[in-house]
Image (cartoon, grey):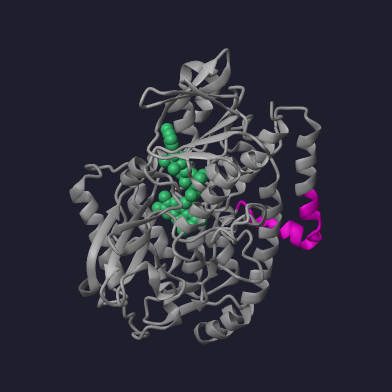
């Protein structure tokens, strides 16, 4: 038995590193154990092909918690966030295209050619979304209330949320409450007429979800991706210079600076529980490490079923964890390109390649892509979010060549026919490349190398249950005080001394650092002893 540590963090995803750094900063002796040979979890940059750096999971970052950047001095440790402009380029099915700029007035001008009515609606719509996202932003920082408890602090977090809503004024408050549970297709239908605009905005409401844009609750998912965007920016696209792995590298530097030990290639086999209390972990090598508390960055299913074991848990709690929906739907395709894609109508390289390229020509297109998945097959024409970071960050590729990263949806984890074997992986890669080639005909001939990750690959490589990119779906019944399950949404678990700090906790997935930050606060609140 080695140790004892004040805390062991299982997993060096970005949230695990955030929690570890804050605990170290508070004077705790902390050990991080990561199963992979690299840190970062789903925020990682890897040379899939030598000389070419790919963000192999997340290729944009979300609303990175400003306190994390400040407190952990991440800029001094080399973090540079780049806000792409335009944020999105979306080709339409009629050969035209949409550009969304960071400056709303510029977007209005771009929209005017497509639809004067949509141009008029843009600023009021983006203001409404900004206000709604600001309310969520306040809720993200708070620990969710314990619905079953009597702690006055629970009341306080509800009050804070209420105050945030009240500040909007009555009209906006009612409007935000009205839209929150809606289908994103209905919301967009109320405001806009252009197919490609509606499809492209709706794509933010279905990202990572086993749902189409016509499903209730997708407005929440849409807003989730606009928290922290501010200033009328819709579908924000922020990247990290050098790749998202530079963020997790900077976090690791900060954590080590606070005395944290980080060990890679160290899969934790199980959490040691004695008399209902976590007292350490056993590694797959058989080594036992003792700690006063254990914090899991793994998703709730892995944590409770693989690392703790149902026999240590109350059957009612086991039932709740069993019912968490994961249902991964994303695949990832990485391409090394000998030349940039030439899109019909915009064949030359230009700013349209700076942000993400969204293949989302209409709401119906997205809904059809979902239909395939609903019946257990990968979308024949998937929704694609394409990123070419080498356009603005040439160091990630060999000179004159480019890296293209594509999140493709829907690729359901469970297939009705067959399984995610090598042939299915290639078919998926073909569907993605074929779909994009309809808009950029030179793509196929530009490809030098191709790498495809199915949802099963995401599970096996990154440890994401069912390949779910958020450690559990972002549906309304799995958020806030219900994340990961009602009664255990305050980063604590039924096992004393065992905490959760990953995306499976409030406020959920994305590269934000909020779960890790909130978890550290609650752990320190429980005392350092
Ligand atoms: C394909 C894909 C695309 C995405 N795209 C985006 C995007 O563009 N923008 C965005 O904001 N978000 C995106 N996301 C979501 C985002 O990356 C995740 O929600 C977020 O990174 C999760 O961070 P985390 O630290 O909570 O967990 P993770 O990053 O999952 O980290 C958990 C860590 O725990 C480790 N671990 C698990 N079990 C054990 C064990 N037994 N022993 C030791 N270590 C263990 C894992 O190896 C992993 O390193 C994407 C995710 C994926 C997979």
Q: Is residue 159 among the parts visible in the rendering?
A: yes
Q: Which residue lies furthest to the left in this view?
A: 423
Give the x, y percent position of residue 470. 48, 46
Left of 430 or right of it: where is 143? right
Q: Nearer the viewer, residue 368 or 78?
A: 78
Give the x, y percent position of residue 453. 31, 52
> At 19% across and 48% down in the image, what residue appears?
422
Left of 19 or right of it: where is 266? left
Q: Nearer the viewer, residue 284 or 485?
A: 284
Vertical comparison of 342 with 71: above or below: below
> At 55% across and 65% down in the image, what residue appears?
81
Left of 112 or right of it: where is 147? right
Give the x, y percent position of residue 242. 44, 64
Q: For the magenta stretch, what is the residue range?
A: 162-181
> At 55% across and 18% down in the image, what residue appears?
314
Where, by quadrant of the figure, is residue 379 drawn? bottom left
């Amino acid at each position: 038995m080695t140790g004892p540590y004040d805390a062991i963090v299982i997993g060096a995803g970005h949230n695990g590193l955030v929690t570890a750094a804050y605990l170290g900063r508070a004077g705790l002796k902390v050990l991080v154990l990561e199963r992979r040979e690299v840190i970062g979890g789903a925020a990682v940059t890897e040379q899939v092909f030598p000389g070419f750096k790919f963000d192999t999971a997340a290729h944009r970052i979300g609303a990175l918690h400003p306190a994390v950047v400040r407190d952990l001095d991440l800029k001094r440790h080399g973090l540079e966030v780049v806000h792409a402009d335009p944020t999105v380029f979306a080709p339409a099915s009629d050969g035209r295209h949409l550009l969304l700029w960071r400056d709303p007035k510029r977007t209005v001008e771009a929209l005017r050619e497509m639809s004067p009515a949509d141009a008029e609606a843009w600023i009021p719509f983006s203001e409404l979304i900004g206000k709604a996202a600001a309310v969520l932003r306040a809720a993200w920082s708070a620990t969710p209330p314990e619905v079953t408890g009597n702690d006055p602090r629970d009341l306080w977090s509800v009050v804070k949320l209420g105050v945030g809503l009240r500040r909007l004024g009555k009209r906006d408050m009612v409007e935000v409450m009205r839209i929150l549970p809606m289908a994103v297709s209905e919301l967009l239908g109320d405001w806009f007429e252009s197919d490609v605009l509606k499809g492209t905005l709706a794509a933010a409401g279905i990202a990572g979800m086993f749902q189409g844009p016509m499903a209730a609750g997708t407005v929440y998912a849409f807003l989730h991706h606009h928290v922290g965007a501010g200033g009328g920016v819709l579908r924000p696209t922020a990247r990290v210079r050098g790749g998202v792995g530079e963020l997790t590298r900077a976090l690791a530097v900060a954590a080590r600076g606070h005395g944290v030990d980080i060990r890679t290639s160290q899969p934790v086999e199980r959490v040691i529980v004695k008399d209902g209390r976590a007292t350490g972990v056993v590694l797959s090598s058989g080594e036992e490490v003792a700690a006063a508390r254990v914090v899991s960055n793994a998703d709730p299913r892995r944590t409770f079923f693989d690392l703790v074991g149902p026999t240590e848990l109350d059957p009612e709690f086991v039932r709740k964890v069993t019912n968490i929906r994961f249902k991964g739907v994303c695949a990832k395709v990485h391409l090394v390109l000998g030349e940039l894609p030439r899109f019909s109508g915009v064949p030359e390289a230009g700013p349209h390649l700076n942000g993400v390229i969204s293949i989302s020509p209409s709401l119906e297109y997205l809904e059809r892509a979902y239909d395939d998945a609903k019946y257990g097959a990968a979308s024949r024409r998937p929704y694609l979010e394409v990123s070419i970071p080498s356009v603005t960050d040439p160091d990630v590729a060999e000179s004159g060549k480019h890296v293209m990263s594509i999140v493709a949806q829907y690729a359901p984890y469970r297939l009705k026919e067959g399984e995610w074997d090598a042939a299915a992986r290639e078919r998926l890669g073909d569907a993605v490349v074929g779909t994009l080639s309809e808009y950029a005909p030179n793509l196929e001939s530009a490809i030098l190398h191709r790498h495809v990750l199915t949802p099963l690959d995401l599970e096996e490589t990154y440890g994401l249950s069912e390949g779910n990119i958020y450690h559990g779906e972002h549906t309304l019944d799995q958020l806030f005080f219900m994340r990961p399950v009602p009664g255990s949404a305050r980063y604590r678990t039924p096992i004393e001394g065992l905490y959760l700090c990953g995306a499976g906790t409030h406020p959920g997935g994305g590269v934000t650092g909020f779960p890790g930050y909130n978890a550290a606060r609650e752990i320190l609140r429980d005392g350092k002893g």
